[in-house]
């Protein structure tokens, strides 16, 4: 009976470890020579960093298609925009290539990150 409890406890620990690792891996994506890291801003919004060969090339804490410093509400949207920016870099364009709201929508950014919304402080 003790062995069964111990085995069950070990399996639960292993499952929780694997789940935690999966979540962290989604915050870091590699595209060729580039690595994208999704970051969390102090106000619980998201941004991203793009590295090439381990060297930081882009640090974006806000939505690049607005002139106000508001981060992404959803981590997935930060990753979509970061992937778009990497694709621009891979095509030889500069890292300050302008992204429009229309292009962001076309890339799949959800509507809640295509509007200017001030995050609520708790």
Image (cartoon, rainbow, N blue to C red):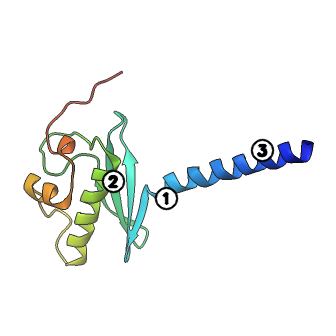
CA separation in Å, label 1 and label 2? 14 Å
CA separation in Å, label 1 and label 3? 25 Å
Q: Camera-side residue: 109 or 6?
A: 6
Dot label at residue 48: 2
Residue carrying label 1: 25
Give the mark nearest the N terminus, 1 or 2.
1
Residue farthest top in this picture: 122
Q: Position of residue 55 (x, y in %)?
A: 39, 67
Q: Residue at x 19, y 78 (%)?
A: 92
Left or right side of 9 for 110: left
Q: Position of residue 21 (x, y in %)?
A: 57, 55
Q: Do callouts 1 and 3 mark residues in contact (Cβ within 8 Å)?
A: no
Q: Residue at x 18, y 33 (%)?
A: 117
Give the mark nearest the N terminus, 2 or 3.
3
Q: Nearer the viewer, mark 2 or mark 3?
A: 3
User: Dot 1: what SS?
Assistant: helix
Q: Is residue 32 above or below residue 51?
A: below
User: Dot 2: what SS?
Assistant: strand
User: Dot 3: what SS?
Assistant: helix
Q: Camera-side residue: 70 or 109?
A: 109
Give the mark nearest the N terminus, 1 or 3.
3
| Residue 95 image-quadrant placement | bottom left
Residue carrying label 3: 9
């Amino acid at each position: 009976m003790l062995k069964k409890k111990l085995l069950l406890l070990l399996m639960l620990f292993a499952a929780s470890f694997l789940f935690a690792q999966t979540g962290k891996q989604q915050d870091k994506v590699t595209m060729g020579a580039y690595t994208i890291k999704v970051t969390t801003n102090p106000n619980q919004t998201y941004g991203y960093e793009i590295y090439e060969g381990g060297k930081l090339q882009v640090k974006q804490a806000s939505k690049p298609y607005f002139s106000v410093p508001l981060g992404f509400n959803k981590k997935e949207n930060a990753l979509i925009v970061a992937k778009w920016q990497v694709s621009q870099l891979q095509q030889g364009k500069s890292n300050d290539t302008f992204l429009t709201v229309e292009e962001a929508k076309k890339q799949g950014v959800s509507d809640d990150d295509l509007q200017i919304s001030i995050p609520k402080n708790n």
